Amino acid sequence: MAAMKWWGWGLEGVAFTHEDKPELGPFIEEKLGLDVERIVERPPAFAALAVPEPVLATELRDALEAAVGAVHVTSDALDRVVHARGKSIRDLVRQRRGDLPRVPDVVVRPGSEEEVTGVLKAAIAHDAVLIPFGGGSSISGSLEAEPEEERTVVSVDMARLDRVLSVDAASRTARVQAGVFGPALEEQLNAQGWTFGHFPDSFTHSTLGGWIATRSSGMQSDRYGDIADLTRGVRVVTPAGTLVTRPVPSQSTGPSLREMVLGSEGRLGLITEATVHVQRVPQERRILGYLFPTFGAGLAAMNELAASEVSVSVTRVSDAPETQFSFATRKKGSLLDKVKSKALTTFLTRRKGFALDEMCLSFIGYEGSAEHVATQRKAVGELVGRHGGLCIGSSPGQLYDQKKFDTPYIRDFLLDRGCVADVSETAAPWSELRSVYDSGRAAAQGAFATLGVQGYVMCHLSHSYHSGACLYFTFAFEPAPGRGDMLEQYDVVKRAVQQAFVDAAGTLSHHHAVGTEHAEWLAQDVSAPGVAILEALFEGTDPGRNLNPGKIVGARRIAAEAGNRTGRPE
Amino acid sequence: MAAMKWWGWGLEGVAFTHEDKPELGPFIEEKLGLDVERIVERPPAFAALAVPEPVLATELRDALEAAVGAVHVTSDALDRVVHARGKSIRDLVRQRRGDLPRVPDVVVRPGSEEEVTGVLKAAIAHDAVLIPFGGGSSISGSLEAEPEEERTVVSVDMARLDRVLSVDAASRTARVQAGVFGPALEEQLNAQGWTFGHFPDSFTHSTLGGWIATRSSGMQSDRYGDIADLTRGVRVVTPAGTLVTRPVPSQSTGPSLREMVLGSEGRLGLITEATVHVQRVPQERRILGYLFPTFGAGLAAMNELAASEVSVSVTRVSDAPETQFSFATRKKGSLLDKVKSKALTTFLTRRKGFALDEMCLSFIGYEGSAEHVATQRKAVGELVGRHGGLCIGSSPGQLYDQKKFDTPYIRDFLLDRGCVADVSETAAPWSELRSVYDSGRAAAQGAFATLGVQGYVMCHLSHSYHSGACLYFTFAFEPAPGRGDMLEQYDVVKRAVQQAFVDAAGTLSHHHAVGTEHAEWLAQDVSAPGVAILEALFEGTDPGRNLNPGKIVGARRIAAEAGNRTGRPE
């Protein structure tokens, strides 16, 4: 099995490349002013890093070894560095720089809930800090110890808890250990004819426990629901013992403990197991491509779809810039070529009145029996037509399916070329979606102008609900020389976009969680009393601040100035 | 407008009667050994009650009057007694007895969020206790002050906050004040072409804020969702200020504050407003009756329906005892007569092989376009047929529609005749539903045997979900003479049933909340660490115990012996 990169997304040996995508190089050159052939920086060799010595008292090491076995307790430098952070752009840049002020002192790998309990007891007895680690794909800063932490930091890697324990066929639920990665979960379930149906972009590199701890959402959420809908019962090792909520379909027994665990980012304890919805693998799974004349037409169609009697599994509409990016990433002779064919463009412009630079690519997914899929397709086709759109068949859908989990690798590709790229996502009511979109775009473009850089920002709608939808922005730019550190410049854009979300009617994050990256806006999203309630919850249940302290609320320096936030070595 | 009864369900002048239901008297005689013509107890005249003098310092009264206006602050005895409790059987019996050890000292009626804030500030400044009051229909003890409370108790009646503030047509949401009652809410929304679609049994006598505070569920939850699904943004006046969560469709900003407010029963603050889902009034709303040969067949059909591609608004199956009760309540010459017709019974027994004493009545509801309703009906018909059931048309559905909000009045009818009747409900995974049903029934019957009474217990499934459903039990019996107090005997049955739920795989309550009635089983449902987390939450946010103290967790005498629980005057 390939090892996780300590400096980038995913696995060693896997990378994004422009070489099989003839239009991508010219596109990046045009939009970002970047020469894709020019590598300006590569990650250093691991041996070149100065990894701080671990702080680990013999008594604590003994206790951890007693809990999980000596072979599952390590202070190996590479292991510690891999577990030091998640995969935010701030994480990647600092890892590449060898900027490692506070890596975990020890990584432990429990193999059972009992062992997790042993780890927690040892940590609390010795006043150490516990940071649960699933797939390590957090882009919100949820996995990094506070820089000024003086106590021993224990990273608890949950990956040995990787099994589907049982499937309750009558209730359509499965008991699953929290450390299982997406592919292993689907594989175990598929073998019995079931699917979980939760496919976030990070699917390959994230775990059930991580999804729950961050309130994740998957691409097929229109059909399956968000992780909050899919998760029924949880088991969480807490300082007060193992919290067990029953896998009942609904209950009115006070504020929902299940919902407190969802999004808790390790602050309440270590999630060991969940009972989750599963569904029979559908007879058909189909994703079709559509084109809309404008982004506004696409939004309106998705809104109407959400209110209709039609049921779909995926709703996604890219804005024009993202549509152009998608076309630029198509492989030579590939399926999407059809869309760019002369015949089609002529049809679109002459017969449909499309302006090609405003045209938007959309994906709509269907699942179920062949008859159900056929009926829904037909109804959607009519609905899309009413908004001036048209179906372009299943070829783009296959492309979507094939590349969906590769996208995060692009950030490393761009970093090698001296360019930062990142994502920011939000959710808003349908009535506010357009203004949140406009605000987010304007904020990014304003920040580019402030920095004097040639940036690119693009967006798509995904995850439609009754009352609104998610907007997912991606932005990229090459930092201006002489205008300060790359991360300081990144912050100018990131902060502008997040501020635009909360200034409009959006939320701070639809599915990437708070961590430390988003903590400074939390009060603007959930109000100051909301923050006070969360602080009361975490302080009351973890008075010693042993459980991933500083995440979501209560960081020691949320309001620190930008210079600190970039975390550069002094 | 008729006044709320101080001694029973609903409004003065409205009552259940057996007189227009020819079979009900004989049915009750047979099943409970009760003569419906023999009234053994009527509520006393209000004037006969000894209502304790209010404890209200001038400074606090002045502060409350400054907050809401003198006309909206009252210590009138009837008003205080009406606000003293909810409508649990324990509440009704004690009210009828004039057992009033700790009624609120003052009732205030704020007319705006600002006034609510004024009330909260006054209460905290003077160390008084605040108990929010919506429709007063709680059957879980959520509205009663702790008997040993020595501070001033302020009942905050929210009924003046009764308006739909705005409808966001594009997002299909409405901003609604929390004190609005069900009928007024639907009326205001219907006038604009919208419906909320939340119809609990208490609909006529309960409010939006009450539904949220207790995690309510309505009869059409299969289509609209529970109140937790319907509620997007909330505004709650708390000691730390007004908690405001955004009405976004989904978010990952830490543990959900919205979900902490849901089910909080006044312990976090006073809910003043919510932004909730609304839907266009459907073209058709249809409830059809079905018959199944056995309860097991009905459960199996509902399970299959929940997994299917069919969408319905109501799923309900009565067990055989409840089916027999339903038949016994039909009016002379009424719609249900058809079901009992000779031709049909002959058909059922001879052609379908039904045993009439095992036959189960079911209701399935449909909403949407005429075409959608027709398609779903057809698919359901086939599914029901596969389980040996058959459709008996819309007449029973009309009966269901007509009587659905009247059922709670029956408890008063029975109390007049010296008989206690109550409900207990749970939810469980599909795989456990039958055993929870069997356990619940056996527990009630075992308790009847212990008491030496002739009791009746009946049950229905309602609220189907992907992974399970709700089971709703009703039980009734005439207490045995010489076997102790009526409420002590009631406790024997109620406790046996609740214990059976948590001993099996059920939850303590699907939609009636915890209050004080269910608090003693809470740790068995959500585990001791779950209770510890809830305590930390409430203690941290309300250190002075001013907000409805003792509800859900932290009651001063949860474990008190049965004699105390009945609350009889010493």
Image (cartoon, coloured by chain):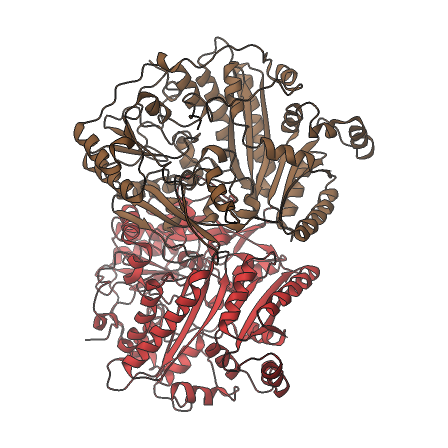
Chain colours: A red, B brown
Relative to residue B336, is residue A255 drawn left or right?
A: left
Does A389 appear above or below A506?
below
x%, y% of residue A170?
62, 46
Q: In which quarter of the image is residue B156?
A: top left
Count of marks placed on residues: 0
Which quarter of the picture shows residue A159? bottom left
The residue at the far right in this view is B350
Left/right of residue B337 with respect to residue A140 in the rendered view:
right
Q: Is residue B63 left or right of residue A250?
A: left
Q: Outermost residue toward the top?
A: B482
Give percent across and percent down for residue A160: 45, 59
Residue A449 in picture, x, y percent from top left: 30, 81
Q: Which of A411 and B266 is in front in this view?
A: B266
Image point (82%, 31%), residue name = B350
Viewer-proximal residue among A269 and B297: B297
Q: Is residue A236 visible?
A: no
Give the residue displayed 55% in from the left and 15% down from the top: B453
The quarter in which the C terminus of chain A is drawn is bottom left
Image: A338 above or below B19:
below
Residue B317 figure quarter: top right
Q: Where is residue A441 in the image (x, y as percent from the top left)?
A: 38, 73
Q: Judge whether A128 appears above or below A46 on screen.
A: above
Does residue B184 appear in this view?
Answer: yes
